[in-house]
């Protein structure tokens, strides 16, 4: 790990996607996995950013899934790198810092 003491953030959208992998009875396990993360909620500015990302991608014919647009908008809004194993997918978003995990 390059930055073991760096703060960790997760979009509320990513949290929902992560939680999907857990059965209802495993909610405490899900919460335990994410206890070091600060959850980033959505707001009006992020909604606007998401709409502009979707517009840009639609006009260039390089769409992303709706959740991914919201995740990218969250990272852009907070000026954070988006850490993913799918770098090529998110590099379509102009101005987004993308790092592979």
Image (cartoon, rainbow, N blue to C red):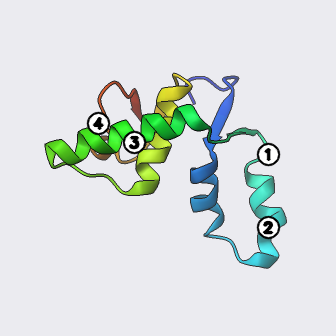
Q: CA distance from mark 2 to mark 1?
A: 12 Å
**Residue 98 got which mark?**
none
**Residue at the farthest left position:** 60
* Mark 3 or 1, nearer chain start: 1
Quadrant assignment, res 43: top right
Which is more toward the observer, 31 or 75? 75
Which is more toward the observer, 1 or 62? 62
**Location of residue 3 in the rendering, given as x and y in whole percent from the top left corner:** 60, 23
* Mark 2 or 1, nearer chain start: 2
* Mark 3 or 2, nearer chain start: 2
**Location of residue 40 in the rendering, given as x and y in whole percent from the top left corner:** 66, 38
Q: Which residue is mark 1?
A: 35
Q: Is residue 39 above or below residue 65?
A: above
**Marks 3 and 2 close (CB-CB < 8 Å):** no
Would you call the spot at circle 1 few (<14 residues within 10 Å), some (14-19), or many (20 or more)?
A: few
Screen quadrant of the N terminus? top right
Q: Which residue is mark 4?
A: 91
């Amino acid at each position: 790990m390059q930055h073991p003491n760096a703060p960790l953030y997760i979009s509320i959208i990513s949290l929902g996607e992560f939680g999907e992998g857990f059965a209802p009875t495993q909610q405490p396990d899900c919460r335990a996995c994410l206890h070091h993360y600060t959850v980033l909620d959505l707001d009006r500015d992020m909604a606007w950013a998401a709409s502009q990302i979707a517009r840009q991608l639609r006009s260039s014919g390089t769409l992303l899934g709706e959740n991914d647009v919201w995740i990218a908008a969250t990272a852009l809004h907070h000026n954070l790198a988006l850490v993913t194993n799918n770098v090529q997918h998110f590099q379509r978003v102009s101005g987004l810092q993308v790092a592979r995990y």
